[in-house]
Image: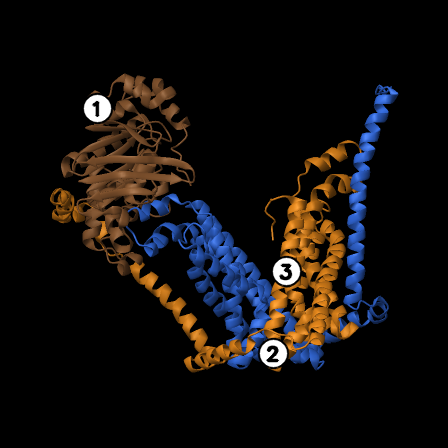
Chain colours: A blue, B brown, C orange
Amino acid sequence: MSHVIARLPEPRLRALEDAYGAAVAAKRRQVLLGGLVLAALVGLSAWAGEVDLAKFFANLWRFPSYIGDIVPTLRLAHLGEDLAEWYWGLGYWLRLMGETLLIAYLGTMLGGLCAISLCFLAAANLSRSARVRWLVRRVLEFCRTVPEIVFALIFVAAFGLGPVPGVLAIAIHTTGALGKLFSEVVENIDMKPVEGVSATGATWLETVRFAVLPQVLSNFASYGLLRFEINVRGAAVMGFVGAGGIGQDLIESIRKFYYSDVSAILLIIIATVMVIDLATERLRHALIGMERRS
Amino acid sequence: MLVLEGVSRRFGAKVAVDKVELTVVPGSFVGVIGRSGAGKSTLLRMINRLVDPSDGRIRCGDVDVTGLRGRELRDWRARCAMIFQQFNLVGRLDVLTNVLMGRLNAAPSAKSLVRLWGVEDKAIALAALEQFDIAGLAAQRADSLSGGQQQRVAIARALAQSPEIILADEPIASLDPRNTRIVMDALQRINRTYGITVICNLHSLELARGYCDRLVGMAAGRVVFDGLPESLTDDVARELYGLEAADVIGEGATSPAAAGWGARSPVAIPA
Amino acid sequence: MSATRTQRFEAEALAGLRGLAARHPSIFRVNWPRRLLSVAIVAVLAGLFVSGFWALGFSFARIAGGLDKLVEFAGFMLPPSPGSYATFLTYLMALAQTLAIAFLGTLTAAILAFPFGFLAAKNVIPNVFLHFSLRRGLDVVRGVDVLIWALIWINVVGLGPFAGILAVATSNFGEFGKLFSEAIEAMNKKAVEGVASTGGGKLHQVRFGLLPQVFPVIVSQVLYYFESNTRSATIIGVVGAGGVGLHLYEQIRMLEWQHVSFLVLMILLTVAVIDFVSGRLRFAIIGNAKIAA
């Protein structure tokens, strides 16, 4: 036999129900309003974005067929030959991938160095001049808001085709992104050592070197590695606008319908990106582990 | 001779230090006493120029401390070393490097930035550590040390500056009774052997009476007492400390009730 | 003056140098292996850095020449101007397209990835094989840049913003699938257990135990990605997938610097507005809690 919960007297029950009902209704109205706004935005965007579902479904078969096209024909009996034919340009592509990695590395290093030298000026706790801080922050904001491809396009016009504009574009974007992160790290440090060192009569540079750098270095390295990972992806498409790396060959093979080349190059890029992801993750965990131990 | 002339400091509407007049004779051991928030900390920080005075002048010999900038300010800071309640060491650097921070002002910047310390600087730093029996810890990371050891490292850093004045801002407030003794003895020894002036903020009246040869009492930013320890009567102390008086007057120098000290909020440093 | 007396400590220390050196030999001995190692590391890093630049064709002449041109371009960029009112309207429309690409792309990806997030979460479907293969699949989708996806979708639906929407949706699908499943895995089990204890089935547990916890986190992540997609949607036009990027590309090609700077200003302004609005929304939804990005 189960117990029956005693019913409240009718008027009190009515009052509670009404209050609950009103609260739920208010929330429903809010959700409904939000839904309407969302629907309106979707409609507007669909119009502006020239969404054509009929065309989409009529042509959707092309997507699997395209994927099918770029997958090479590999026959078990002639696997060696087929692989060799698929990756006919392996050496060349690997060299281009190497160039892509080098672009990412140099861009990250250059941008990281700029970010390190600027972040202390942008940090509220170390920069003494509010005007300098404001200026540095705006510059960093500009550097990370303008997409790196746009910088690359402009630099291609200025420096000519090749990896040079690619490196510079990535470096500028990295300066902006890392500069902001670094200055946030610096703003979160313990200020007591800073006071202690500057009270001995050390210069600003010495204070930063001995009281700030030991506290922030591992975080800087971790963010730098994360950025390197992002920059490898970025460098892979720099070639789309003529700024060096493997992207140039990829866009050409897509545009000229060299199907098997597309998959070959894509696979190289995906594999490299995954290896870099794993490697940087390992390194970052090792860094964090070192931090915990010591 | 360190002279403060009408020195004031305001933080917004709040007056932390109010027209302080003070003359400190070289070689003396001055205790600055008063309750939390009386302006003791701000006063000491102004002498080292970690905080700039809003009004008034600080002079030392023929140097106008209040007007110093750049190189001259750094030289002045090297002459008046600072010791903090929380030690303010760089936890991730080893003990010797922390003490070598006291040599930064004297050593050439280009060399010290890449940690190429001169033999003389190392010798001075080590000798400072030996003074307080912690030379054996030279290679350890500073944050692996106990509070008492860290404060001794901080005093060694101050000594390595070979300063004329040591400003100690509540140096024992985070320590237990045994370490309190060790640290205060260390300050006294420096004062007696090398004639370094010590200006020390203290909360405990008993300690102040025991170690200092002159007491300066502060309340609400003003100097309300200035004289020999013996002339500080319990009545004056009651006035100085108000409700805290019972805590401060009753306690002996050897039993400063560590638990009570830890619970006391640290001196507020207005931002 | 006391100065003479205070120097005494230094003098004593230096006089006792021999003794100090005898007592603490390790401190005075130069640690050559360590010093050489640090010099070697610095040398290798610097060498790689410099030779890298050299290998990629950097030279002082080229940098100097390029900077010269950049300064020249910067001069041409002032004042920013679209030329005519008609062009301005075209740019405005392209900007609207960019926003549409970011908005619809993010929304589609979120809706599609939502069920996948649950499927790929260990605590919802504890199947190691499914978990592993879904996560790796999402990784591959993520590993392909949005510009590459745009090129592929152009082959399907032709040039224009629709391809852009699909590209943003595809690449974000991979990101969201991973993020959502991680968010779900990080959730507190207590609510789920509570629902289970009342006799609720698996679906009930997800609907009433997980969803209310996960929803705000997911919405704020989606908004965060909308911000970042607005940035990437500005450049997706470079490969022909609609939006303001195409104009930017063309104007840079034709060296119409006033147009370029005008377009960049428009982009900066739009990104700032979107950041502001979305930041407000995120704050309203999740409070001031830090959002894993």
* x and y percentages locating residue A233 in the rendered image: 59, 67
Q: Give the image location of residue C250, x and y in percent.
A: 65, 79
Of C180 and A82, which appears nearest the observer? C180
**Regarding mark 1 in the picture, which secondary structure is present there?**
helix
Residue under disc 3 on the same chain as residue under disc 1: no
Horizontally, residue B202 falls left or right of residue C138, namely left
Give the residue pinned by disc 1.
B229
Q: Tell me the distance, in whole angstroms, between the alpha carbons under discs 1 and 2.
A: 80 Å
For the residues bearing labels 1 and 2, Cβ distance under 8 angstroms:
no
Q: Secondary structure at mark 2?
A: helix
Q: Nearer the viewer, residue B63 or C97?
A: B63
Q: Is residue C272 above or below residue C254?
A: above
Q: Is residue A46 left or right of residue A227?
A: right
- Give how far across and how far down residue C269 sits, in percent: 62, 63
Residue at the spot 51% in from the left edge and 55% down from the top edge: A181
Asked if residue C119 can be seen in this view, the reply is yes
Residue occupying image coordinates x 67% and y 66%: C233
Q: Which residue is mark 3?
A: C228
> What amino acid type should be assigned to the residue bearing mark 2?
Ile
Q: Earlier in the sequence, mark 3 or mark 2?
A: 3
Where B179 falls versus C145 (above or below)? above
Secondary structure category for the residue under label 3:
helix
Residue highlighted by disc 2: C252
Point out residue B16 in the picture as x, y percentages from the top left corner. 37, 35
Which amino acid type is shown beneath numbered disc 1? Pro
Q: Residue at x 43, y 54 (%)?
A: A217
- Quadrant assignment for the N terminus of chain A: top right
Nearer to us: label 3 or label 2: 2
Amino acid type at circle 3 is Ser
Q: Chain of mark 1?
A: B
Near mark 3 (Cα within 10 A), the count class, few <14, some 14-19 or many ≥20, is some
**What's the distance in space between the residues labelled 3 and 1, CA to CA?**
67 Å
